[in-house]
């Protein structure tokens, strides 16, 4: 069971993807994949956490990745002992490495069993982490567009 749940060794091993050249014209619109379900295991407490991941990027030079590869990347990154903050950063940094986009935005909203089942026992608490780069970090309108898109 744990081999399946904790199957990822390193985010560097994520290789099964293809980039596509598409004619985007002068458009610099974002690509948004939202509400990607995920689960992982907390490396501190060995208890699960789970939730939704929202990922966006702004293509550079007409380069896009297959849409199914974004949820696959999320699954790949989260299938190891981890913390939510690390998953957020690793998804974003891998997309930056693969695509060299004009910007990347990642938001994760998750419930942690280490909060709900023990300690403070706050059932239903949601933890939100985020990562913004490029246009999403430097341009408030772009960031707002992303945040409005994941509501």
Image: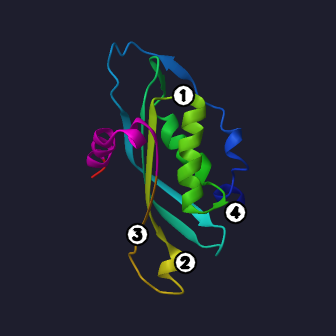
- Packing grade of label 2 (10 A; few <14, some 14-19, many >=20) is some
The mark lying in front, picked from 2 and 1, is 1
Query: Disc 4 marks which residue?
Result: 2
- The mark lying in front, picked from 4 and 3, is 3
The image's mark for residue 99 is 1
Circle 1: element type: helix
Q: Nearer the viewer, mark 4 or mark 2?
A: 2
Mark-to-mark CA distance, 3 and 1: 30 Å
- Dot label at residue 126: 3
Q: Which residues are magenta?
A: 131-149
Q: Earlier in the sequence, mark 2 or mark 3?
A: 2
Q: Which residue is mark 2?
A: 114
Q: Earlier in the sequence, mark 3 or mark 1?
A: 1
Vertical order, 38 against 132 (above or below): below
Question: Residue 29, percent across and down?
Answer: 33, 28
Q: What is the x, y in percent for residue 146?
A: 32, 43
């Amino acid at each position: 069971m744990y081999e399946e749940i904790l199957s990822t060794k390193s985010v560097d091993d994520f290789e099964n993807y293809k980039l596509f050249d598409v004619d985007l014209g002068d458009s610099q619109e974002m690509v948004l994949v939202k509400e990607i379900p995920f689960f992982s295991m907390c490396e501190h407490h060995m208890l699960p956490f789970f939730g939704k991941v929202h990922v966006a990027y702004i293509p550079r030079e007409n380069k896009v990745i297959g849409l199914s590869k974004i949820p696959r990347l999320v699954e790949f990154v989260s299938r190891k002992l981890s913390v939510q903050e690390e998953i957020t950063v690793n998804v974003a940094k891998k997309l930056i490495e693969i695509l060299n986009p004009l910007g990347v935005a990642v938001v994760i909203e998750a419930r942690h069993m280490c909060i709900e089942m023990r300690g403070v026992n706050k059932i239903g608490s949601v933890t939100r982490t985020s990562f913004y780069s490029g246009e999403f970090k430097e341009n408030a309108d772009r960031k707002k567009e992303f945040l409005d898109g994941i509501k």
